[in-house]
Image (cartoon, grey):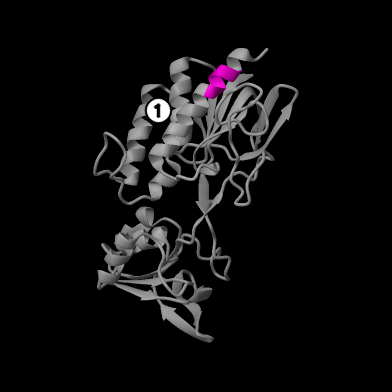
Amino acid sequence: MYDLIIIGGGPAGITAAIYAARRKIKFLLVTIDVGGQVVWSSEVDNYPGIPDSTGIGLVQKFQEHIKDYKIKIRQEEVLKLSKKGKICAMKTKKGVYESKAIIIASGKKPRKLNVPGEEKFLGKGVNYCATCHAPSFKGKVVAIAGGGNSGLEAALFLGKYAKKVYLLDINPKLGGEPYLREKVLADKKISVLNSVKIKEILGREKVSSLKYEKGGEEKILKLDGIFIEIGLVTRADFTNVKKNKWDEIMIFRSTKTNEENMTNILGIFAAGDCTDIPAKQIVVAAGEGCKAALASFDYINKWK
């Protein structure tokens, strides 16, 4: 029996784990990766005390902090959460773990295009992380699916490596922040194709082209890779706590116990981008992880 189980290794989960280690309770940190969505960020200029960093650089700082507290991580995929009486249970492929409280900080994952060839060429030209894989496409031709902030940032980052970048947007006009749009439109390496629907990703052993539709006409674009940046979906299908229409976990101050970041199930807390907080920012997720940890400690202290 653990005092606390923390699910997720992004800024919310890691912050909660650091607070749990300092409190010296018996806890478990479970995650399939360390860093979460932070790894995908090419530049991080607004995290207090660590200016001019990258996503990977910030994650390295997180990992160093984890090592300082000798926090052990179980790299397991969570399949289901349940609660029987006052005991919370987490099921993975390796077993069932019980605790007094749980913090869900599972973040989000990339939304898929769901077109033919996407699964087939995953890792063979199809990518979801420009920050991770851009150097592999140095001097090559790439496309980006998505015209929001993620797509614009990916285009600018890939422009540092690729010979040519095509930005394919299903909408008639680019979205995202104005300053990002200006940078993209001013970059001679980047060509923007609006009102485009990607139909299929083509190739033999790896990606060689894609088929898209524009104005009712199908066309072929030759390239070496495609980066899919069309938004994110919540990683929370393993739990039946109350969610909003975007499948984000709804959190509030419990009326029964007065703790923050509680879900509708007593003893199960949530923090970070998997929740319905409007600001999806690294520093906000870290703060929410802290709030959830402190609230869980109060709950555990009352647990009998």
Is any atom of residue 72 visible in this view?
no
Horizontal and vertical percent position of residue 286: 42, 34
**Chain part drawn in magenta:** 295-299
Q: Is residue 136 depicted above or below 219 in this figure?
A: above
In the rendered structure, does residue 293 fall within the stretch colored magenta? Answer: no
From the viewer's perspective, is 226 left or right of 82? Answer: left
Q: Nearer the viewer, residue 242 or 123?
A: 242
- Quadrant of the image occupied by residue 142: bottom left
Label 1, secondary structure: give it. helix
User: At 46% across and 82% down in the image, what residue appears?
Assistant: 220
Residue 29 position within the rendered picture, expressed as x and y whole percent measured from the top left: 52, 29
Total marks placed? 1
- What residue is drawn where x is 45% and y is 58%? 128
Above or below — where is 25 with respect to 101? above
| Disc 1 target residue | 66
> Label 1 neighbourhood size at 10 Å, few (<14), some (14-19), many (20+)?
some
How would you classify the magenta stretch by its main secondary structure? Answer: helix
Quadrant for the C terminus in the image: top right
Q: Is residue 297 magenta?
A: yes
Residue 285 placement (x, y as % from top left) = 45, 38
- Which x, y percent locates residue 208? 43, 75
Residue 287 visible within the image = yes
Q: Is residue 206 left or right of residue 2?
A: left
Q: Quadrant of residue 61?
A: top left
Residue lying furthest right in this view?
A: 85
Q: Is residue 266 left or right of residue 286?
A: right
Q: Which quadrant is home to the N terminus?
A: top right
Residue type at mark 1: give it: Ile
Q: Residue furthest front?
A: 255
**Picture layout, residue 100 above or below residue 275:** above
